Image (cartoon, helix red, strand yellow):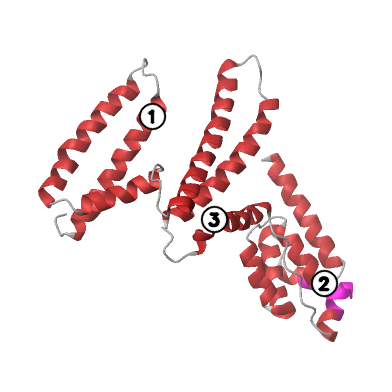
Amino acid sequence: MQFYRMEMINIKERVIEWAQSGGDFRDGLSLFLTFNRNVFYVRNIEAKGVTRGMETLVSEFAIKTKIAAGVIHEMIRNSGGPQKRAQIIAPQPAPRPIISEREKRTIKLREEFPFLGNKDCPDEMAIVVNKMLTAYDDYRGKRERLYEVNVNDREQCYQTAREILDAYILNRQCWDELNHYKIHGNALGKMPEFKISNMRQKYSKMNTVKLVKMLNVNIPRRMTYNKKELNNSDSANKDDTRKRMAMCREETKLIKEILKKRGEL
């Protein structure tokens, strides 16, 4: 919380400094990107031009800093700086906003896996790409924590290492899915997103009687077994049990959706 307050104070000071120095539109876009990484939104602000874009930019700064938009505009007007001259003389086109590291990695992925831009690319691939990027960020961020772990706390060491390893494994699983589709033109299908898609196709072909039995008998039976496994202190791998339970919940959700469409629920 203290770090958050310090960060807010820092942003507020920078906004005030920006306004008092003339409120240059280009500098404002760069300043906005320091706390809002939505590059597409920033490009939309830029596309409005200086006059309309400044209105949006100042409104965003006002929301972030709790300084009234009118006060910010007043500081800009009183500065007599470059922004005022730009509005009087001629609006200067703002440069393209700085692309974040995540954006750069996304572009590289699209270059490595061009099928991502195809209309027939499975929707699940967009989820895989997002998971891959997030897992990579998690891996890098959590890896730094290794230097902060108390080496005498075995549980903390294990948990930190486990999180780093999980992020690495997920990143590689995503890469395997993308690379398999690139080579073979079809999904490898090992990630949950594809399993759910395959389940939907499978259950859509089942008759209502079988679906009702799955919903009321088979899935509850598996859930009961998994709950017992989870509560068993001797269970070797509770993470796998939780994944199976999560999959059971997804199956239940899918079957109910299908039965509702058929008018059975």
Disc 3 or 2, which lies upstream in sequence?
Answer: 2
Q: Secondary structure at mark 1?
A: helix
Mark 1 is on which residue type? Asp
Could you say where residue 204 lies in the image, as x and y percent from the top left? 21, 54
Find disc 2 in the rendering and name its residue.
76
Whether tag 2 and tag 1 are in contact, CB under 8 A, the answer is: no
Find disc 1 in the rendering and name its residue.
240
State whether residue 48 appears in this view. yes
176 relative to 237 in the view: left or right = right
- Residue at x-position 57% and y-position 58%: 110
Mark 2 is on which residue type? Ile
243 relative to 214 in the view: left or right = right
Looking at the image, which residue sits at the far bottom?
A: 89
Image quarter (top left, top right, bottom left or bottom right) of the N terminus = top right
Q: Secondary structure at mark 3?
A: loop
Find disc 3 in the rendering and name its residue.
113
Dominant secondary structure of the residues highlighted in magenta in the image? helix
For the record, the magenta segment spans 73-85
Looking at the image, which residue sits at the far front?
A: 183
- Residue at x-position 81% and y-position 82%: 87
Disc 1 or 3, which lies upstream in sequence?
Answer: 3
Looking at the image, which residue sits at the far right?
A: 80
Q: Secondary structure at mark 2?
A: helix
Whether tag 3 and tag 2 are in contact, CB under 8 A, the answer is: no
Residue 89 higher or lower than 248, as above or below = below
Q: Nearer the viewer, residue 55 or 252?
A: 252
What is the spatial separation of the Cα atoms under label 2 and label 1, in whole angstroms? 58 Å
- Residue at x-position 77% and y-position 66%: 28
Mark 3 is on which residue type? Phe
Disc 2 or 1, which lies upstream in sequence?
Answer: 2
